[in-house]
Amino acid sequence: MVSVLQKIIGDPNDKALKKLASIKDAVNRLEPEFQKLSDEQLQAKTAEFRQRLEGRESTDGLLPEAFAAVRESARRNLGQRHYDVQLIGGAALHQGKIAEMRTGEGKTLVATLAVYVNALTGRGVHVVTVNDYLARRDPVWMGPVYHALGLTIGCLQHDASYIYDPEIASGKLPFLRPVSRAEAYHADITYGTNNEFGFDYLRDNMSLTAEQRVQRELHFAIVDEVDNILIDEARTPLIISGPAEEPVQLYQNFARLVPRLDPAEDYTIDDRTQAVSLTQEGIAKMEQWTSTNNLYDPDNFHLVHYIENALNAHVMKQRDKEYVVRDGEVVIVDEFTGRLQPGRRWSDGLHQAVEAKEGLRIQRESITYATITLQNYFRMYDKLAGMTGTAATEADEFFRIYGLEVVEIPTNLPMQRADNSDLVYQTTDGKWTAVADNIVNMYETQRPLLIGTTSIEDSEFLSERLRKRGVPHQVLNAKNHAGEAEIIAQAGRLGAVTVSTNMAGRGTDIVLGGSDTSREDWQQEHDRVVELGGLHVLGTEHHDARRIDNQLRGRAGRQGDPGSSQFYVSLEDELMQRFGGERIKSVMSWTGLEEDTPVENKIVTKSISGAQVKVEGYHFDIRKHLLEFDDVLNKQREVIYTDRHQALGDGDLREKTLGMLRQEFTRLMAQCLPGRHADNWNAEWLIDELGQICPLPAELEYEDNVYQCSREQIERILSEHAGTAYAQREEEVSPEQMRLIERFLLLRAIDSHWVQHLTAMENLRTGIGLHAYGQRNPLVMYQSEGQKMFVDLQNRIQRDVVRTLFHVSVEPAQAAALTGNAARGRRNGGGSPMQAVSGGNRNAQPAGGGKVGRNAPCPCGSGRKYKRCCGKAA
């Protein structure tokens, strides 16, 4: 049906390529002109382009000339000239699209085109990489291109930041000069990982002074390996947290109890969702072992949390697959890339449960100070683009979530890789035997081999088999990632056998004959490998996502090289078991074939592809669900962070504070004077509450005065009194100190209550699914309850600011101390992420000063009223 429609209306990708081809033609016409320019004239083009942008010209109008300048700079400084297809890819990136380019087509060089033209605006361009190594390599590799055109290049690392400097040719990191984080962000171009950009955004919104913020506006980002970052990583929210006081003994207790459960009777595993649930028998055993009458009684519900985590840790989290134990810590293994994720922890107590299972020291659970999903972070950019070798299978999700179109860029040379049909075996043992036999046979021909496995455990299992059969090989997985670059560099040599997890699926290209092309015998070895058919990729199991399989296949056949790929599949593989493997296995058993005899059948191959589509759809639903829930918190986060920026900025908070004062008066009237009739009023309560905020207006000093006024009169009196009281307070402490008080009070109130609100929203989300049993949509209930909680949050912030405003002052020395402590806290990473929330930095908070009302909170910080605390002695 789709092919018929394409014949009628045409292929959308072909139409997009035709439009982009006109830009390529324009650049080619300009090439001779730019080749005649001297180096100084070429660099001067940047100033000329910027001057034209300050006029009425747009970046689209500059595109052909800007691309021609970058192409010429790359030719002179790197010895690499952009191919025509690379110009098309660069144009797609500039238009805010995803350029799907095959492995070895030079995506890093393509990015320079769109990066340069958008950096001309002076608003900064972020180039997002998948790991620190690429974030460090690419600015040095592409730095000469940008530097020759007069642009500055920043580089972010986990614990440092740099600027590209061609004069620093030696040292630990050649061509990179250490600078402050802010300086790296204020460069024209900044390279870094998605985590560095995302966490810096969160830290900026936890800073205590405007000077501590490092990021500029989020203008334009190009995301390398965009499917990995915006899809695979999207399910993991970025969270900055601190330790919470939680008992760890319960984790250890349940880690000992759960292994005693019978897998056949006491719990079930959903094949599709992989969710683990206790059966009635399992619940009964747990109640007996914990001496609990009813596990699901509200008083015992916290125990269910520990049991479920212990069960998940025992059944679903397998060592050397989902995680490894290193230096006494549980380190997560990324399921898509196979890389270790140090510093990342499973949330909601699951990580602690795994630590208890392994008998390690249990770290305390954490409390969230700031959080955002990668989906919402990248949607904040004015313009977003991406590059990858595999995006077409997820084109629908890219468009629906991010508004990004996918353009498939043709290869520079025809693709020569042969992708063979899957070989399907009945059993896992039969599959592994066939894999080992095939490797031995191919090793004897000296053809280079790359074997892809889906876990560390499988890579080590296969490695042991090959060792016993005398096949020398290299193993690349998260346990020995330090030698990754060297292993990949030699993976294309004669006789090379490389066993790898998904780590080999992305990043450095595998060059036939080895990457050391300056070697004397390299050309001879390269030609010999080409004669043998190039690199052969052997997949030992299909991944849940077709993209990951395609990434592995893409290691072979780079830039027109020959190559081949083939997957070995068992009907006992996890993917097949979840989606109909048993049914196919029973059909195959009727044929009477041996377990090590492969079957090539269209029905089986189609079933595997269909299973992957189902899993991709399931994961998309999870990501979409996560986004829908996070959108609720995201709207609230935008309001709070805007208020924080306002508090840290140079603007005047006078009108905002006055507005809060009037709103608090209105809220008190609604509480103390409900309705229009005085019979329902509580004048004593109103006077007491008003007295805690500021001096009373003369017209409402006594209860009788209140009852003699109408509601409208009281409202007018309080509105006018807000301005009068504020002006008197400002005159009393001076306008400069009033500004300081307003900023500190607003900042302190936002930080303390926002942290509590995040915890409350987490708890709400955890239990909101129960509404489904009452035939109510959990998302709608979450939106409704979340809005009520947010209104309450704003009221509490307002109440704190207003009720402290007239009773405190901030001395200049104390303000300086606050700034200094905050800066030290950020540099050292010590204490709480937000110093304003930390109880250990009391001098960071406004100190008592001036007259304190009897009913006002005591300045000593006890939380009691002044008259019942320090006021007793007054």
Image: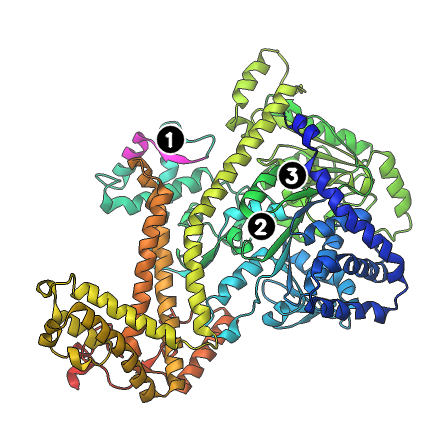
Crowd band around label 2 with a 10 angstrom C-alpha radius: few (<14), some (14–19), many (20+) = many
Name the secondary structure under disc 1. loop
Residue positioned 61% across, 32% down in the render = 542
Question: Disc 2 versus disc 1: distance between alpha carbons?
Answer: 32 Å
- Taking depth in this image into account, of 634 and 662 the one nearest to the observer is 662
Residue 202 location in percent, x, y?
49, 62
- 86 sits to left or right of 808: right
Sequence order check, earlier mark of 2 and 1: 1
Residue highlighted by disc 3: 392
Residue 70 location in percent, x, y?
79, 60
Crowd band around label 1 with a 10 angstrom C-alpha radius: few (<14), some (14–19), many (20+) = few
Find out whether the residues at labels 2 and 1 contact each other: C-beta distance under 8 Å. Answer: no
- Display colour scheme: rainbow
Residue kind at label 2, given as amino acid type: Leu
Is residue 275 highlighted in magenta? yes
User: Would you identify the image quadrant in which residue 492 lies?
Assistant: top right
Residue kind at label 1, given as amino acid type: Asp
Can you say whether 264 is above or below 16 in the image? above
Residue highlighted by disc 2: 340
Residue highlighted by disc 1: 262
- 38 sits to left or right of 700: right
Sequence order check, earlier mark of 2 and 3: 2
Residue 792 location in percent, x, y?
30, 60
Name the quadrant of the N terminus: top right
Name the quadrant of the C terminus: bottom left
